Amino acid sequence: MFEKISEKDITKAILKGFARDFEEYAESDVIIIGAGPSGLMAGRYLAQKKIKTLIIERNNYLGGGFWIGGFLMNKVTFRAPAQSILEELSIPFTEYTKGLFVADGPHACSKLIASACETGVMILNMARFEDVVIREEHRIGGVVINWTPVSALPREITCVDPVGLEAKLVIDASGHDAVVVRKLEERGIIKIPGYGAMWVEKSEDAIIEHTGEAFPGLAVCGMAVSTTYGLPRMGPTFGAMLLSGEKVGKVMYEKIIS
Amino acid sequence: MRKLYLKKVILYNETSSKNFNHHEIGEYIKEMIPSSHVEFRKQFFNPRNDTAVELAKIKVRNLDSVSFYQPLYGEIEFEKKILEDPDKASPAVLYDGMRLQQITRESILKGERNMDYLHIVFTKRFFASFDDNDRRYHARVAIFGFPNIISTTGVVEAPAKPKKYYKLRNKFSNLGLAFVENKLKEELHGQFIDYEDERMTQVMKGYSLQAIFYHLFHQSFCLDKNCQLYNGHWQEEVIHAHIKSGRLCSYHDEMLRRYTSEN
Ligand SMILES: [Zn+2]
């Protein structure tokens, strides 16, 4: 039924395809760390605008926590006005009560992933952020990455050296871990706060408001925003993640074309 | 003892809530103290270049320690936005109230920096003060002194809500924020002061009186739960003192009466 193809041709096809992309994206306009809902939205927006964008994802799957909603149930909820993004992505949803919308997790997540990929954003999965590249006077100029499995190996046999990738801007979309921001703190460049106002439920707006450049050359979006600025932690709020991703895309686009 | 006097009350309204009317509060103050002049201003800050940096610096970083450090670029940019449009202030950003008062004090016009003037700033900014007894920050509705700062966010967030509110919140938090908020609104309607609450102006009248009492008599609180000077720690108490009662106790009423008859 299938064409007869030799093993070596398969190997070559993989290698060449990968090498071509990897070489091209050794220098990008924007590198996004994390392919959860906010990272995918950001990548989608930028690639649509013809900005050369690379997303680094440590897992083999994309979408982060967007597959599943509260209590491991695969319904995801959104508050107005986030349903406009569902419409844009052709994700079916129903209105539960006024202004509260429910969609199917797997359907929503796969649509978002497909939509991001179709814009031409480059994705490198199973790769892990290791460090930042710092250019002149405290400005981020790229990231250092390695294969995810390497970090799982015992130290004495982690013989795979990481590689550096350059970019005009880096976006930390790595969720509560905020791995890029935390790395800056580890290196003594910034200090990030603990969680401030634990009282407040209304932190979705604050996530959106704080989305953008946090440090020269480094922007934050999604849950990484709450870690960076010490905003209250909250439950699953996919609407805020999608809107935050779109906003960081817009802000970074303006920055690049100006 | 210093002479009690109040020449002018200046009310600054940094919020744009349609349910908060600072003119109505001005009228109320004139009613309570007919000799006072009331002036209305929109924005409080006349930002200097470094105001945004100073404000970003005084954010509460940890609830159990007082520590300030160099803010992030993004935090300074955020403060610049709020200085331009104070209505953008976020309830998720918590400031050290005493330091906020210091910074605002420096922004008061030179000629108005004396005890003839009572400045009340109504703001959406949310602040807390550090309590040396339990070594923790506690959210506040108001910081009295020079100037007085009263927070429309604080009145929603600082006094504790009914116990049922927290039970529901814990029970449903896994189902997502959107779900929880709807549920809470349904089940506890009216039992706490909310954002855009229709009772906001009425409640703020009481806190303004507390500021006036602090200015004139150096006491802003009363132990009588029916008095507007009662320092309510629960939403129920706040609603009782300012809405259900909405008046001063006879002792404080008499105190104010004596002042107004002499001035
Ligand atoms: Zn009293």
Image (cartoon, rainbow, N blue to C red):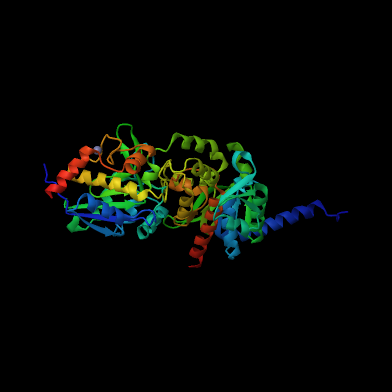
Q: Residue A89 appears in which quarter of the rendering?
A: bottom right
Task: Find residue A197 and report its horizontal and vertical position in percent.
Answer: 41, 43
Q: Quadrant of the N terminus of chain A?
A: bottom right
Q: How many marks?
A: 0
Q: Is residue B40 visible?
A: yes
Say if B251 sits above or below B82 in the image: above
Q: Is residue A62 visible?
A: no
- Nearer to me, A79 or A35: A79
* Drawn side of residue A179 relative to residue A94, left or right: left
Q: Residue B134 appears in which quarter of the rendering?
A: top left
Say if A214 sits above or below A47 in the image: above
x 41%, y 44%: residue:
A193
* Drawn side of residue B52 relative to residue B186, left or right: left
x 62%, y 44%: residue:
A148
Task: Find residue A244 and report its horizontal and vertical position in percent.
Answer: 52, 54
Assign ligand 1 to one image quadrant.
top left
Task: Find residue B38 and report its horizontal and vertical position in percent.
Answer: 23, 56
- Nearer to me, A5 or A245: A245
Task: Find residue A121 and report its horizontal and vertical position in percent.
Answer: 62, 59
Name the residue at the right extreme. A1
